[in-house]
Image: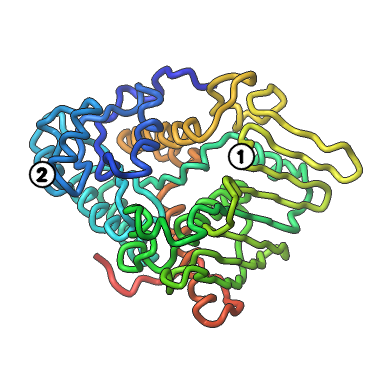
């Protein structure tokens, strides 16, 4: 159980790029990082593309005025001159800026925590992985839902053979908040998400389904996709070529099959984030709307609902428990769990404790690259007429940075 006691020697000096007053995601980063005040301390930031607004925002959340910078380049250079300069930076900016900021941060000797999807191409991902290795730094990816404890319970039960061999993987992440084009015109956050120059080669595949794909790999680390077929649509025509709805069919190397539906035009849907794993003997199902519960359905027996924080759960699940079984946890605790693991990973890397790193389950640079490759394979299938394609899990670099 987590109770806020320190897991590393001291809090890491932390900064943010983006995540200011007008952003949707910055607060999630802060409540995650600062939930355990023994892990991170927010000391600096380049919070906004408009410097004065960013400075005003930073001061209002407790950052000293002199460490609220007009841009990330100024922040990295200025902080490098301080004895108490930043050690790690979170990148909470539009997709198209991730690569250049991440590269600059690593070159400045900083650990990096970055929003998803990590970059536009897997080649960029491999370049950053090589740079992070050279600089001996951690790159983490904020798959914010993945800190939900019951996902680790699913992982443990599958490893223990509680459902038998996996046959079917059923994934969904949908909502209805973009079912018309109103937000395309009024929301700055939505405007860039449907601009290929800023968002990259996809909309909902990158914005939504990369979460669910990573979570499925977290739950089933041995399950590898062999082939997939992706059919994507732009129901709001002005969003083309980016999709607001997509279906993906998958065939796994062990013979299992899967499907994923991702959409932002599921009108009326407030929370359609669901994972169901069907085995030869039983099934497991988790819904984001009920994150403290896990359905365990054994063929021929009564349906069981496993509840977070109860002593019958696996040790791996219980290790991230915070509030006790009588008290509900949710997205803020999930973010806190992954940020605490980022801190532990950074501390282990600083101490050159590779064994501790190898035993830590968290969304690292490899998870970020896997998410990019997921998108690349889906786009390749869809753009060739929704055809089956062999899943390209690895690509040779054609160039290096």
- The residue lying at 16 percent from left, 33 percent from top is 85
Q: Quadrant of residue 89?
A: top left
Q: In which quadrant is the C terminus drawn?
A: bottom left
Find numbered disc 2 in the image and state the secondary structure of the residue it sits on.
helix
| Front one among 56 and 75 | 56
Q: Which mark is residue 337?
A: none
Q: In which quadrant is the N terminus drawn?
A: top right
| Front one among 13 and 63 | 63
Find numbered disc 1 in the image and state the secondary structure of the residue it sits on.
loop
**Real-space CA distance between mark 2 and mark 1, rounded to the nearest whole angstrom:** 43 Å
Q: Residues within 10 Å of mark 2 (few under 14, many from 20)?
A: few
Q: Nearer the viewer, mark 2 or mark 1?
A: 1
Q: Residues within 10 Å of mark 1 (few under 14, many from 20)?
A: some
Q: Position of residue 259 (x, y in %)?
A: 66, 62
Left or right of 8: which side holds 80? Answer: left
Q: Quadrant of residue 43?
A: top left
- The residue lying at 18 percent from left, 29 percent from top is 59
Q: Which residue is mark 1?
A: 289
Left or right of 122: which side holds 98? Answer: left
Q: Which residue is mark 2?
A: 77
Label whose residue precedes the other's in the sequence (2 or 1): 2
Q: Residue furthest bottom?
A: 384
Q: How is the image coloured?
A: rainbow
- The residue lying at 30 percent from left, 25 percent from top is 11
Q: Position of residue 195 (x, y in %)?
A: 34, 66
Q: Position of residue 263 (x, y in %)?
A: 55, 59
Q: How many marks?
A: 2
Q: Is residue 173 above or below residue 349?
A: below
């Amino acid at each position: 159980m987590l109770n806020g006691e320190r897991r590393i020697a001291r809090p890491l000096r932390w900064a943010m790029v983006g995540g200011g007053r007008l952003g949707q995601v910055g607060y999630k980063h802060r409540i995650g990082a600062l939930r355990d005040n023994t892990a991170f301390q927010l000391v600096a930031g380049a919070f906004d593309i408009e410097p004065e607004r960013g400075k005003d925002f930073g001061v209002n959340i407790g950052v000293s005025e002199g460490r609220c910078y007009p841009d990330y380049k100024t922040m990295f250079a200025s902080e490098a001159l301080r004895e108490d300069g930043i050690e790690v930076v979170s990148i909470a900016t539009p997709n198209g800026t991730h690569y250049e900021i991440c590269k600059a941060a690593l070159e400045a000797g900083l650990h990096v925590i970055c929003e998803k999807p990590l970059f536009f191409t897997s080649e960029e991902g491999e370049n950053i992985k090589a740079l992070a290795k050279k600089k001996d730094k951690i790159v983490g990816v904020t798959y914010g839902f993945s800190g939900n404890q019951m996902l680790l319970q699913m992982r443990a039960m599958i490893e223990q053979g509680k459902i038998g061999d996996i046959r079917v993987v059923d994934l969904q992440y949908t909502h209805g908040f973009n079912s018309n084009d109103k937000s395309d015109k009024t929301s700055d956050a939505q405007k860039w998400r449907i601009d290929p120059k800023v968002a990259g080669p996809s909309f909902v595949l990158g914005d939504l389904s990369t979460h669910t794909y990573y979570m499925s790999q977290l739950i089933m680390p041995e399950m590898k996709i062999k082939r997939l077929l992706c059919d994507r649509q732009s129901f709001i025509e002005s969003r083309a070529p980016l999709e607001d709805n997509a279906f993906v069919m998958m065939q796994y190397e062990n013979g299992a099959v899967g499907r994923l539906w991702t959409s932002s035009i599921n009108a009326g849907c407030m929370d359609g984030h669901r994972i169901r794993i069907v085995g030869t003997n039983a099934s497991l199902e988790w819904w984001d709307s009920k994150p403290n519960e896990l359905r365990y359905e054994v063929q021929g027996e009564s349906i069981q609902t496993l509840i977070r924080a109860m002593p019958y759960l696996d040790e791996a699940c219980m290790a991230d428990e915070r509030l006790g079984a009588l008290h509900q946890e949710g997205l803020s605790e999930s973010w806190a769990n992954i940020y605490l693991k980022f801190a532990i990973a950074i501390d282990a890397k600083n101490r050159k404790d590779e064994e501790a790193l190898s035993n830590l389950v968290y969304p690292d640079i490899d998870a970020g690259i896997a998410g990019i490759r997921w998108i690349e394979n889906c786009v390749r299938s869809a753009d060739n007429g929704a055809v089956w394609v062999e899943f390209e899990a690895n690509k040779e670099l054609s160039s290096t940075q």
